[in-house]
Amino acid sequence: MNPLLPAAYLSSVALLWATPSIAQNATPAEQEAPTGASAETEEAVDTSGEIVVVAERIPGQLDVPQKAIEVLDEKAITSYGANSVSDLLASLAPQTGSGRGRGGGGPPITLINGQRITSFREMRDMPTEAIRRMEILPEEVALRFGYPPNARVVNMILKDSFAQRTVDIEYGGPDRGGSTTAEQELSLFSVNKGSRLNLTAARERTTPLTEAERGVIQATGSLSSVPGDPDPAGARTLISDRTNTSLNATWTKGLGKGGLGGSITLNGTISRANTNSLQGLNSVTLIAPGGASALRTFGDPLERSNQTVSYQGGAGFNKPFGEWLLSATVDASRTESDTRLERRAGTATLTAAAAAGTLPITGPIPPQASLGFDRAWTASNSVASLVTVIGRPLRLPGGEVTSTIKGGFAHTAITSEDSRTALGRFSLKRDDASVGVNIGIPIASRREGFLEAIGNLSLNFSAGYNHLSDFGSLSDWSAGLNWGPTEKLNLQASYIVNQRAPSLAELGNPVVQSFNVPVFDFERAETVLVTVTTGGNPGLVKGTDRDLKFGANWQLPFVKNTMIMAEYFRNNSDNVTASFPVLTQAIEAAFPGRVTRINGKLTAIDRRPVNFFNEQASRLRWGVNVNGPIGKAPAGAAAGGPGGMGRPQGGPGGRMGGGGRGGPPMMGPMNANGVGRWNLALFHTVQFRNRVTVAAGGPVLDLLNGDALSGGGVARHTLELDGGFFYRGVGLRLNGNYTAPTRIDGTTDLRFGSLTKVNMRLFVNMDVAKWLAKDSKVLKGVRVAMVVNNLFDSRQKVTDSSGTVPIGYQPDLLDPTGRFIGLDISKRF
């Protein structure tokens, strides 16, 4: 264990409590008030119960043609009851998720005050109370900041002045027992006129859960019939013993008067994860001289342990130069992973003694000497830098042309060593130099009074080039259109062509053979132990993705605070690099050289990555987002407003799309005037096509109709839900997912049942629930939440053609946790 980690952890804890002056003289959270220094304010007016929002530009708001998918003000954010930005984004997954690309987009791109950040680490631990406004925007906005348009953009606008220290304690576990999880977190955050500081120390511990504690049925032929032999179910963990510790620090200095002249940011994170699991028992089949035999299990459970230590650091610089904004970021990391695997005991002496008759096959097994541990060690190093220049070089009748020019360099290196191979220390490295440009051209504009009968119409084009030191050149380009025929309707269309390279590991990982790996054989409908080959495949080639998207956002004119969104995606990709898929009969026919059988029995699989000739997919993702107030504001209390979702709009905003501070905070705490908030977001995705051509002239796999590459195929229908309410300090949040049933065809079909999972969070904010907390100083700043994940204890049921659950698909193997119940108590100072 690194001796610096405990010392650093304790030092940071002491720092959080011993240096209250570190808040840089920021106004305490409970004493926030508008400063009056900014004329850019938001005001809500109550007219006979109807809310009229007058919104002027605030610093940090994005000025882009695309209409925001959702805008949350301070009160709406409070209604989620989230302790940190990472928790808030998890709750907003249906709104922030993207359906773009072959497998859907990744996590959202995050901005602070309309500007790029070094990494998500910079804001993940930030308290949600520090956010004045949050904007969720479509994928095309990512091009403006130098990112590919495959993930949505989330912009957090911070309050001008805010300070808070937080203690957070969580404890919980499955309602059936067997394992518990405890987490403690201490954090300090302050922001004052563009300068901010965030320190967070966290520790999480999860206790193990074994197969015996869930009554998992063991495979036929794996159990000893001799009384007194240990049960392998108690020697295999479903949930590992885990301990995670992390320290995260971010410092930002605002430049110029009031922090409006740019910023400098430094971020550093150190984390350690220790994992211990049990991998079963030693076993041997003893054969007596007369031919009688007995399967024996013996010894202590075989152990597997891993320690992963990660060091990460980043730096950022943002500076406006006239009409241009320069942003430069660099992010570096080093991750070391050290895995120890206990070797199986030698059994040659035992089998020889049994064959000679000197060891009764049902007698006590004499102690066997330990053969020690194998060790697998990996160190990954990466450095990535990106410089973007954003500006408005030209004015047309329809508005100003926007441009983004970017250049970057990234270095990745992997060094590994495994005692199970004779390769010794093995190293891979890659350098990636990139350049790119994005141009936005306004065609028509109501604001500019040019072709206003058309509405707002703009085009954007982008192009990029990468050179990889170990692979060669890659290119990408895109074109898009954004049209707002009315104030409430926004339409988008975009087309992306992107070349992809296999990852460094997919190309060059050392080849390793693993023995006695259980695999379900679809040909013979049985689970067998086989030799599996893994590693890199230097024969992989670059792939090309072509992605088309049509989108529409409509704020209904006849239903208040209701928006309907629809997005159609079509993807066509060539030479797709993928892990070797699940071994169905179709895959075996396509890759006969990867499979070894002896007398029809599966004995070996080569699972190194492959290139699929072509993948085609199309889908529609649509949904509704609706919200409203609970109760009516009393007379004279209108200024507090109901909270809720702001009117989504693409502008107006700062000319540079951000910068500066977030302006004065919203007036009054949530529900101070007795008005609550409710909201519901429901999204449905339907897959029309999902096919893979494995090889030129080879079989075509229909993943929607019985074929599969992994898991249980692709569901035609999925649903995502996020909803809840917050009233008088009490909140309830529900989020869930539904996946339709699927199947995998074979000699015996596997049917994967539908799965619905709903998570619930019931919380009380004592600062608002005065009727409950009265004037208690102890409860001031306290939030108490009960968390129930997988509320209905749902687990997928998998059956074969006869209706039997295959032993490898037992529900407790797929989801050993089931319903999880936890308590979360946080105290804000």
Image (cartoon, rainbow, N blue to C red):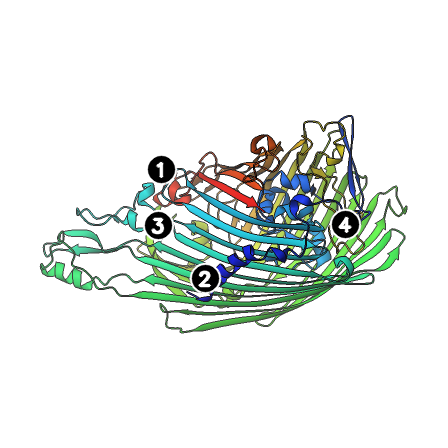
Residue type (three-letter) at the residue carrying disc 3: Thr
Residue 485 lies left or right of residue 431; in this view the side is: right
Q: For the point 59% across and 30% down, which residue is it?
A: 771
Q: Secondary structure at mark 1?
A: loop
Disc 3/disc 1 C-alpha distance (Å): 24 Å
Give the image location of residue 429, x and y in percent. Answer: 54, 71
Residue type (three-letter) at the residue carrying disc 4: Leu
Which residue, given by chain and number where applicable, does mark 3 sit on?
A: 237
Q: CB under 8 Å between callouts 2 and 4?
A: no
Q: Secondary structure at mark 3?
A: strand
User: Which label's residue is closer to the chain start, 3 or 1?
Assistant: 3
Q: Please name which of the two marks, 3 or 1, marks the residue nearer to the observer.
A: 3
User: Which label's residue is closer to the chain start, 3 or 4?
Assistant: 3
Q: Secondary structure at mark 4?
A: strand
Disc 4/disc 1 C-alpha distance (Å): 52 Å
Residue 6: mark in rendering = 2
Residue 788 lies left or right of residue 221; in this view the side is: right
Which residue, given by chain and number where applicable, does mark 1 sit on?
A: 804
Residue type (three-letter) at the residue carrying disc 2: Pro
Is residue 579 visible to us here? no
User: Which label's residue is closer to the chain start, 2 or 1?
Assistant: 2
Residue 191 lies left or right of residue 794; in this view the side is: right
Residue 406: mark in rendering = none
